[in-house]
Amino acid sequence: MDRREFLSSLALTPLMSVVATPATRHRTRVRPGDPGWPSVAEWEKLKSAVGGRLIKLESPLTACKPTPSAAACTTVLKNLQNPYYISDEPAYTQASGYLDAWTSAPSAYAVAAESTADVVAAVNFAREKNLRLVVKGGGHSYLGTSSSPDSLLIWTHRMNKITMHDSFVASGCKTAQPAVTIESGAVWMHAYNEVVTKGGRYVQGGGCATVGVAGLIQSGGFGSFSKFYGMAAAALIEAEVVTADGKVRIVNECKEPDLFWSLKGGGGGTFGVVTKLTLRTRELPAFFGGAFGDIRATSDDAFQRLIAGTMKFYKESLFNRHWGEQMVFRSPNTLQIRMVFSGLDQKKADETWEPFRKWLAESPGDFKIESPVTAFAIPARRFFDPSFWRTVPMNVVVTDPRPNAPAENIYWRGDAEQPGQFLHAYRSAWLPSSLLEKGNEQRLVDAMFSATRYFGFSLHFNKGLAGAPPEDIQAARNTATNPDVVDAFALAITASNRRAFPGVSGHEPDLAAARQNSDRVYKCMDELLKAAPRAGSYVSESNFFEQDWQRSYWGANHSRLAKIKKKYDPEGLFFVHHGVGSEEWSADGFERKNA
């Protein structure tokens, strides 16, 4: 036993009496009111074990039930537009729900964990009392995996310490490397501020910077600069995880490598509760930056030309490690450019786009420049610096408006619609780089144009790793994510949502419009898939009703993940929608099939 494991065991000594209880195979988990539901005394015992950090939950929207127009309700609805408020609220999630799928609803109780020992106590209690267990860090899950009524929630938000290492050696291993250890409740903007702004290094995390660190790593994870630095999960060096038996495990390439591998893209809330992650850090380039523009084609024929010309330009000039993020194609025949870059200066970024600008200018009758394509570069160390963005005229970030909110609580304006969104439909597909090759371009262009006849979609170039450095491609192959990602030049996403709150009069979703939009999203993706039949989908950004989800999310890796799930969680304590092993349970995770 090494030093870290020894210290962990000391910290958990008071709880060891409840760790070794054998699992009992139950057909149905208990709900409030059931004979097996824990008594008040038993809940009090858990509360004592976690230092009083057991919370009985109530949705913040309760304030809207008696009078939706009351000031208290108005305040809550305003707060639910702030991702940091939601992060601080254990009884709610970033999305309010998904059409015909799930609605944000609080657990019965939450353990507001502040230590690994708190997590152990909650896991043991849930296993022994046969409870539905939910884990929430950032709470961004589009599939509703961090929300379930009648459950016990392990809320890791208060576990958010971030520690930099000049030279980290994983337990039982020999290689030393620069790294950062991040507790599972931290969000990426705070991690970036510590690692990049203060530390002068880079760690690959999420593009939406209020996403939780642990959830993103376990889903695979892509950030704006993934073409430059690779997948977030591939940077994992070591993790501390509490498994279903209540054991604290330190896992890495040298110790329990199968469980370690499953945490690199096998899905959050499935194999255990991750409490701490150590990730490789990388050198910063001199500059990060972006390029933005809006172009409208004046006819359908011109739009087809615009799509073809844009994809040709992408292949020739942007299909490399430097460029990421997205282009959006939608009716009425518009292209939005929302790209980022790394490792280029202002001059090189401008030169990159000059041929495209020139090509557009040659056809003024076909292409209307509604916003010129403009690139900007800033020192990379300032890119996540809250003080920097407060001093520049660009309207790029939003700040947490609450009194006395931490100065580091900023988020990208492009993500401002996510808090409180009610999803109508969401689909994604990895598009293979072979579609950019000679002889296949027209098939891609035709599919893209046909898709826009139904709905808009975006190509997220940073979420396909083709074009990334070979070493980052190889590292991605050693994760549990669907191998389709390494051969994809982009992840295509089409989705519809509106800010709405089910059950709140005057703020409920328009279900008729939602169903119409859902139908259009499905038809849009169906057209794109004509160019890439059976393309895999990214688990964190996907269809709640995904067919053949095992293949779609994990491809050939699913069979290995299923064996690891059986090894570490044979009774299925950890359940999430369309997670590994969820086939054995009802849709809500309460009733075992074929028990």
Image (tube, grey):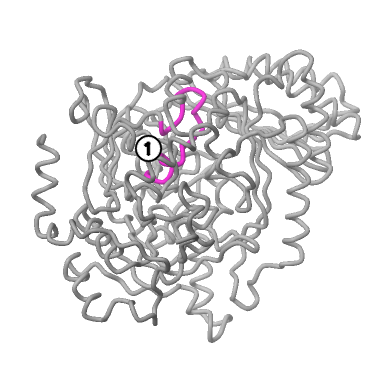
Q: Where is residue 540 drawn, in percent x and y?
A: 52, 45
Q: Residue at x 54, y 43 (%)?
A: 539
| 48 horizontally vs 526: left or right | left
Whether residue 184 is situated above or below residue 146 in the rendered picture: above
Q: Quadrant of residue 180?
A: top left
Q: Is residue 390 visible?
A: no
User: What type is the residue that disc 1 sits on?
Assistant: Tyr
Q: Residue at x 22, y 61 (%)?
A: 121
Whether residue 184 is situated above or below residue 164 in the rendered picture: below
Q: Quadrant of residue 433?
A: top right
What is the quadrant of the N terminus in the image?
A: top left
Q: Where is residue 138 drawn, in percent x and y?
A: 41, 52
Would residue 111 be counted in the magenta stretch?
Answer: no
How many marks overall? 1
Whether residue 114 is situated above or below residue 345 in the rendered picture: below
Q: Residue at x 90, y 34 (%)?
A: 300
| 179 horizontally vs 539: left or right | left
Specify the segment rendered in magenta: 213-233
Badge 1: residue crowd in 10 Å (few <14, some 14–19, many ≥20): many
Return the residue nearer the eye: 150 or 471.
Answer: 150
Q: Quadrant of residue 125?
A: bottom left
Q: Residue at x 44, y 42 (%)?
A: 562
Which residue has dot 1 on it?
A: 192
Tag 1 secondary structure:
helix
| 242 horizontally vs 6: left or right | right
Whether residue 338 is situated above or below residue 360 in the rendered picture: below
Q: Where is residue 434 drawn, in percent x and y?
A: 68, 19
Return the residue nearer the eye: 147 or 302.
Answer: 147
In the picture as drawn, the residue positioned furthest to the bottom comes out as 66
